[in-house]
Image: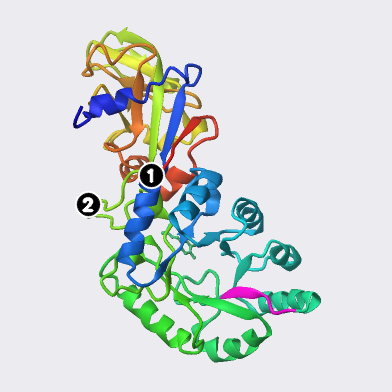
Amino acid sequence: MGIISPTERLLACADPSEPVETGLLTVDLSALVANWRKLASLAGAAECGAVVKADGYGLGLAAVLRALAGAGCRSFFVANLVEGETARALAPDATIYVLDGVAPGCAPRLAAARLRPAIGSIAELEEWAAAGATLGRKLEAAIHFDTGMNRLGFAPEDADAIALRAQAIMPTLVMSHFVSAQLLDSPINDRQIEGFLAVRAHFPGIPASLANSSGVFLPQRPHFDLVRPGYGLYGGNPTPGAENPMRPVARLCARMISVRDLAAGETVGYDGIWTAPGASRVATIGVGYADGLPVSTTGAQGKPAGEAIVGGVRCPFVGRVSMDYVVLDVTDAPKEAARRGEWVELLGETIEVEELAVRAGTIGYEVLTRLGRRFARRYVEP
Ligand SMILES: *Cc1c(COP(=O)(O)O)cnc(C)c1O
């Protein structure tokens, strides 16, 4: 035994219990939990919550919630009422915040599921207070201030007035959101922290929360009472430009369903946008844009294509990414690895979410949340 080589790890992809699948998404819940613990320790005395919106950033809300709650996470954030109701059914005792706030007419259902909306307007505040009055008690909620996003939340200059009106409800959190916490020296960070300090002074005794994943790593340590990481939990790099402090959580493998040899001058795929420069071997894998692999990972003049690891060797996508297939140039891959039925790795420890995103001209958040429903999904228990 001892250190497992990348090839051996890759071989672990191929599991005969999944013979019918062409794509396999492995979600490492122990890495997820390790990431949460790391963020929690960086946050010091602040509580570490978890943002699990968009189906746990595409990796599966139920498994993610179960793993994090099992590790001791108590506060979760979802985007909307429906996500909140799903989360509530999975975690009866958790504190669950709904970042959208009170969508029009949704207050009774939010209250019934014991969800806490992040309230950012007077209309929401009134609907929440009214729903509470009907139930005969003040309902819990976060008060959301907008310190720069211009998206959701009250204006900081209204903090005094809002604190007064918030007496009609039970505020349990005062929060705001960073514009670009991933940029360590962006002057916006300091402005937002200052603005938020002024806001929270109007809510004495109420826990405060500002930091997303990247915010946890800021030198100002704006952790307040509760941090709200999402991306970093799922293996995304919250410190772009520096080495990723998080462990990869998602591993995506695909199976080669056809391998063939091409002569120089032959083309691959729709519109023949790639031409074999010499005698080449190409492999077709059964994953495409319908599975969330962006069409924009197609290579072009001056733009690198996506890549897959075949027997430890990086092999570029050739031709256009299509709905169900990507073709790889496996000319340089070990012969035994470039065979029909063998597995390749598209995402994992070698090709991280950010790398795939850069090759697609998008961000890692989008790559993760679009991972398709067609993959067989396997969860590695913590
Ligand atoms: C999505 C979101 C987060 C989590 O941000 P990450 O960058 O994924 O860590 C935190 N707070 C709010 C308000 C969000 O919308």
Marker disc for residue 167: none
Quarter of the image where the N terminus is located:
top left
Q: Position of residue 274 (x, y in %)?
A: 33, 22
**Residue 98 seen from this side:** yes
As measured in the structure, the alpha-carbon distance from the residue carrying label 2 to the one carrying label 1 is 20 Å
Q: Determine the residue positioned at 31% across, 41% down.
A: 352
Q: Identify the residue shown where x is 73% and y is 75%.
A: 127
| Residue 44: quarter of image | bottom left
Q: Secondary structure at mark 1?
A: helix
Amino acid type at circle 1 is Ser
- The label shown at residue 30 is 1
Residue 216 part of the magenta-drawn span: no
Residue highlighted by disc 2: 243
243 or 290, nearer to the observer: 243
Q: Which residues are magenta?
A: 137-142
Residue 228 appears left or right of 107: left
The magenta stretch spans residue 138: yes
Residue 328, percent from left and from top: 33, 22
